[in-house]
Amino acid sequence: MRITLDLEPNSEPSRSQTPKDEVEWVPLPKHPLFTATAGGGSAATGAGNLLAWDGASRLYFWDSNNNFLHRLSLRLGDPDPISVFAASPSKVLQADVSPTFDVQKISINRNGTAMLLSGSERLSVMYLYGRTSKKDVNLICRTITVGSQAYSTGSNDIRVLKALWHPYSDTHLGILSSDSVFRLFNLAVDPLQPEQEYYLQPVEPGRSRNASSVCPVDFSFGGDHLWDRFSVLILFSNGDIYVICPVVPFGSLFKCESLLEIYNDAHTFGLTSANSVAASNSKLAISWFEATFPELQNQETEGDNLSMLRAQAYALFDASLVLQGPLRRVGQGRNEDSVSRSAECEGRAISFLYNLVSKDSILVTAWSGGQLQIDALADEIQPVWSIGSPPRLRVDSHDQILGLAMICESIASSCPEKLDHNAWSDSFGYSWIVAVTLSQECVVLEMETWNLLLPVSIEMEKKLIQSEGESKERDIPTIISKELLSGPKEVLVPRASPSLRSVAADSIEGRSTLHQYFRLFHETYVEYAHKVTEIESGKQHLCNYARVHMELKHHAPQLKRIINGQYSRIGDAQQKLLKVEEKQSILQKRIDCAIQMHDSLEERLQQLRNLPCAHKKPLSTAERQFKSELDHFKEVELDALHSSVDALSARLRRHAQASKSSHQQQKISGKKICAGDDQLSMLKSSLEKLSLVNTENSKKVKVVESTLRNKERSSRESSLPIL
């Protein structure tokens, strides 16, 4: 198990955040964690990669004996450029649910917050933040299981072949399994159910279908280059490489500048292509692009300055992705058959590596026979769909796509080819390869930097150029002088005479002869050495010039584009400043008017606050109900009460007149007199009750009148003019 640590030149070494007085900085190979007796035994029983680096200053190591994750803080290139130091002791991270499977590989996500623990049967994700244990200083981290419903639990035959974090998402995980299905999980939504599923069905045109051709072994996500960033490259056991494109995680972020480059190329080259299939795929690609990144059109028309765009959940309704391939292997002469036969490797393909060098996609295939096959993509990867093969979508109640599944079949079409060009290796920065053996010993190998970019090959032959029927010879600039290659033109050592063999070295004749030889050697070969020095110096200058020329030629377009962009931004800023200066006087006048209006409103508000009715509160619900009852009493019951009082007064007057006339009737029978007395007593009691009612009604009338007066006074006050 190994990883590679890179340190760019002129960059500051990464330092740990741990206080210096609590840790000891030791060379990484001598760290106590990697001693032969650490852990009480071997670290692993099989092959795997139990190291992971976050790309900054932390190295992670999985201890299989204790099921712990160790975190080491690193110092790269400090105190000297070739040193790697680690903090001791290491920080121990413990999963809250210990894995029940053998961890064979660990990998960290893009922002360094989650660690993937991979096994042949199960997968777990350990989040690298948590709480401190109550028993010790270990950090307890939350751990979840990924895809437990789809992959092996002990009796299932579906195994995990490869699991990788997606390079453009912190929560998406791509998994290739032995059932020839590539799944993409979104851990932030559902770690058990995949977000996207692609069923791989490779069928090679004109060849029989056998077991080796349908068995995937490895995969890799594409690099940061055009459609490669939406591609997934899959290796099968017979060495064939297939591509599915475009595959984008829902909600992932991409640079707007890169998306605009692809979008413009699709309009410029795809739609105008003479190939009808390419034009059709370009139309589908444009529609997919506009639906997946809806803000992309606003960038073109409105000129918005968004740096990143988020991918929306979308899939073409009646089309599925094509499993493009197998990629053809061609040579410099574009002869496919000869290259395919010469590139046959022993055994079966077991592993696959993808790397992006500048704009070249490099593919490395490892075979069980021990060979490494290195190729490079000659053509750009393009998206291809199969019309009439609708995908299976999973949507919510609002018809938003939650997941999709589609069958990806291989069809006879043009595929990205491979090129045997030699690539320029990176000559800047130090690198270290860190490996941990089965006996838990750490090995650090230093990869020194190259100071010069050396040409891959130098053509020393002369080429014949036909011009106007005559053959002319073009001179190739020589790197090494012919004089230096041929050596001295004259051999200045004289032939020894037969008598010279008997001359002793310490004799006068011998010393004279040796002196003559030394003088000849000094005159000839010293001059030759000076020429060698001059030629070597010229070659060094020429190499430096070639290196600078290659670097300038390589970086010139990018620098020109950056400079033009900066000039454009400066021009836009200057135009905006001019507009601001033009509007400054108008804005100042508007500000002065606004201040005056504010002062006037403030003065009027102060005057309104001094009015009597300014502090009047609105009536509550009970008060409004009582007011409505009073209004009803005023309009209806008060008039009826006045009429009742008038009627009772008239009856009282009539009764008084009747009582006077009763005294004149003296001869009325006793029965009639008793009846009159009873009626009189009843009338008196009625009058008394009526007087009580009249008294209560009088009080109510007074209350109503006072309320009405208050209401009239408040209405008059509210109708006063505002000063």
Image: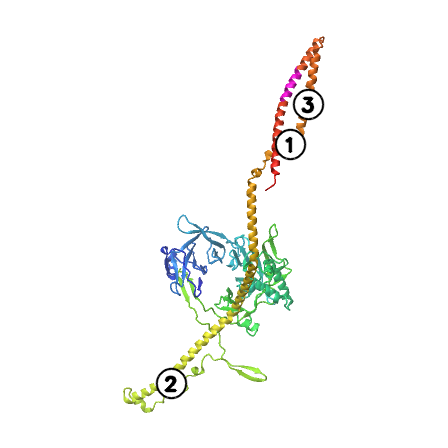
Residues in magenta, as a range: 681-692
Q: Is residue 9 left or right of residue 608?
A: left
Residue 310 visible: no
Q: Position of residue 554 (x, y in %)?
A: 51, 70
Please, what is the three-letter code of the amino acid marked with disc 2? Answer: Thr
First in sequence: mark 3 or mark 2? 2
Please, what is the three-letter code of the amino acid marked with disc 1? Answer: Asp
Q: Main secondary structure of the magenta part?
A: helix
In space, the residues marked 3 and 2 are separated at their CA atoms by 158 Å
Say which residue label 2 marks: 524
Q: Which of labels 1 and 3 is toward the front?
A: 3
Say which residue label 1 marks: 631
Q: Answer with the quarter of the image where residue 698 lies.
A: top right
Name the residue located 68 percent from the left edge and 11 percent from the top edge.
674
First in sequence: mark 1 or mark 3? 1
Say which residue label 3 marks: 646
Q: Which of labels 2 and 1 is toward the front?
A: 1
Tag 3 secondary structure: helix
Q: Position of residue 281 (x, y in %)?
A: 62, 64
Please, what is the three-letter code of the amino acid marked with disc 3? Answer: Asp
Q: Count neighbours of disc 1 (C-alpha within 10 A) and say few if under 14, some if 14 to 19, many if 20 or more.
A: some
Name the residue located 60 percent from the left edge and 65 percent from the top edge.
266
